[in-house]
Image (cartoon, rainbow, N blue to C red):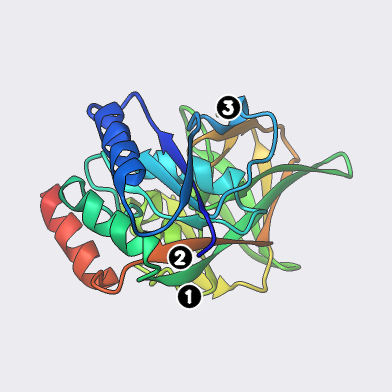
Amino acid sequence: MKTLKIGIFPSYRKEGAEAVMNQILDYLENQTIRPVEVNVYDCRMNRIEERIDLDVAIPVGGDGTLIGVARYLANDDVLLCGINMGTLGFLTDIERGEIEEKLSQILKEEYTVEERMMLSVSVRRDGEVTPIATAMNDVVVKGSMTMMHFNLRIDDFLMEKYMADGIIVATPTGSTGYSLSAGGPIVNPNLNLIIVTPVCPHTLKSRPMVISHRERVCLTVLDTKAGVRCTVDGQVTKPLLTGDEILIEESPCKMKFLKFYDKNYYATFKSKLERSN
């Protein structure tokens, strides 16, 4: 059986993350299921200068930790499975009380793989298109203080002229994030589609939309007096100027999530919503 290359990405800001990392290392060092090669990496991926060769990536933290690792590894054929050290952890599949059980299942390859779509985000300014980032969860265009003005185009069709606090463009994986809080729908993460959710629009006719993953969203900023910014996954931020166009479309990259047979998406989602109450 080939050696399984495992990367652990602890978020040391999370209480107990270092202890969990040590628990993982101890288990993998002493198990006899298969040979493994284990390395620990900084979850702040911008501190890693070279690409890393992995079969499985295990972020230890909350959803934010997992999302940051997912963006960095998006071009690589790596399986992602997070350990929840946060409050809810909609995206992390392993809870603290089941770490060794789930590690054993990973080593025995007792799991399935889900491919999740991602979004390519770029800005067109003065005719020049510049990439911003790849989004696992969502893209938020929002002012800092007051209502912002912008146009929404889907492909070449002008869908809406908005006055709103902002707008969220989310993947199905990101449907349980900021979009959900703003009134967007809950979407099974295995689907390929794009969710467009306005934030506090100044009109009753503006509602969340679900559009095809083959369509491109273009947001044109009409006024930046509100200090408008584009934020990708809550982690990458780009200040915007009047006239900037944010271009959002399906990325060629897919993130592969390792999923266990005894985990049901709807049961997990319901449980974590009830926990939040």
Residue 89 location (% of width, % of height): 29, 48
Residue 6 location (% of width, % of height): 48, 47
- At horizontal 76% and vertical 68% (from top left) the residue drawn is 156
Residue for badge 2: 172
Q: Place residue 230 in its image quadrant.
A: top right
Residue 259 location (% of width, % of height): 37, 66
> Can you say whether 226 is above or below 36 in the image?
above
Label 3, residues with CA under 10 Å away: few <14, some 14-19, many ≥20? some
Total tally of numbered discs in the picture = 3
Question: Element at badge 3?
Answer: loop
Q: Nearer the viewer, residue 266 or 153?
A: 266
User: Which amino acid is tagged 3?
Assistant: Gly
- At horizontal 22% and vertical 64% (from top left) the residue drawn is 268
In this picture, residue 32 sits left or right of residue 118: left
Q: Nearer the viewer, residue 167 or 170?
A: 170
Task: Using the numbered discs, state the Cα–Cα distance from disc 2 to disc 3 in whole angstroms.
Answer: 28 Å
Pointer 1 with pointer 2, Cβ within 8 A: yes
Residue 261 location (% of width, % of height): 29, 74
User: Which amino acid is tagged 2?
Assistant: Pro
Residue for badge 3: 227
Q: Disc 2 or 3, which lies upstream in sequence?
A: 2
> Can you say whether 75 is above or below 9 in the image?
below
Evaluate whether residue 206 shows in this view.
no
Question: Element at badge 2?
Answer: loop
As drawn, the label of residue 191 is: 1
In this picture, residue 82 sits left or right of residue 122: left
Q: Disc 3 or 1, which lies upstream in sequence?
A: 1
> Can you say whether 190 is above or below 22 in the image?
below
- At horizontal 67% and vertical 42% (from top left) the residue drawn is 221
Q: Place residue 186 in its image quadrant.
A: bottom left
Label 1, residues with CA under 10 Å away: few <14, some 14-19, many ≥20? some
